[in-house]
Amino acid sequence: MKNIKNKDLERSFKDLQECWRIEAKLLKTNEQLTIEESDFIKAEANSGSPLGEFLYGLYYLLNLQDEKTAEEWWSKFFYHSNGEALWKASGIFAFLGDEYYDWSMKCLRRAAWRQHPIAKAMYKEMKENPFKFPEA
């Protein structure tokens, strides 16, 4: 098993905290990102980090209004992510509105397929009782 040095672990945790801060800034305050923040999430996305790919897609959508490029980054995220990240993304797409319903359901189905317990139960309930979820 590969040993992780404390220095690398600290750097990874700081990067994760920075990603969470940028996500909150994008979704809660809808502020423009600074050049340093956009460079940071671009580097995270280019390194193959699923969270970075998702955030870079959000950045393109919310700050640059470029939906096509955002969907390209979300497609990369879709195939690189685990069930927890997909479950969270499904909720964010639902928060963004009806025009992202397809992405929300796509992430929910994939999260259920990846054996995320809440997503699995919710997707099963939606299939068994569609009258409770008229939009599904």
Image (tube, grey):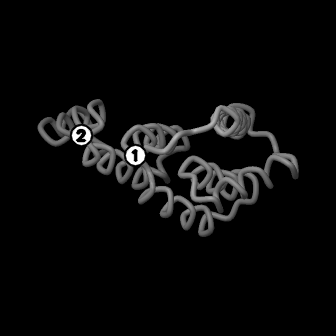
**Figure quadrant of residue 29:** top right
Is 32 above or below relative to 65?
Answer: above
Q: Which residue is mark 2?
A: 123
Give amino acid for label 2.
Answer: Tyr
Q: In the figure, is residue 13 to the left or right of 95? A: right
In the rendered view of the protein, which quadrant contains the N terminus?
Answer: top left
Give me the residue at 36% from left, 42% from top.
83
Q: Which residue is mark 1?
A: 82
In the image, residue 15 lies at what x, y percent? 69, 39
In the image, residue 37 lies at what x, y percent? 81, 46
Name the residue at the left extreme. 128
Q: Nearer the viewer, mark 1 or mark 2?
A: 1
| SS assignment at label 1 | loop
Give amino acid for label 1.
Answer: Asn
In the image, residue 28 lies at what x, y percent? 68, 31
Q: How far apart are the alpha carbons under marks 1 and 2? A: 16 Å
Name the residue at the right extreme. 35
Q: Which mark is residue 58?
A: none
Disc 1, disc 2: CB below 8 Å? no
Give me the residue at 44% from left, 50% from top.
81
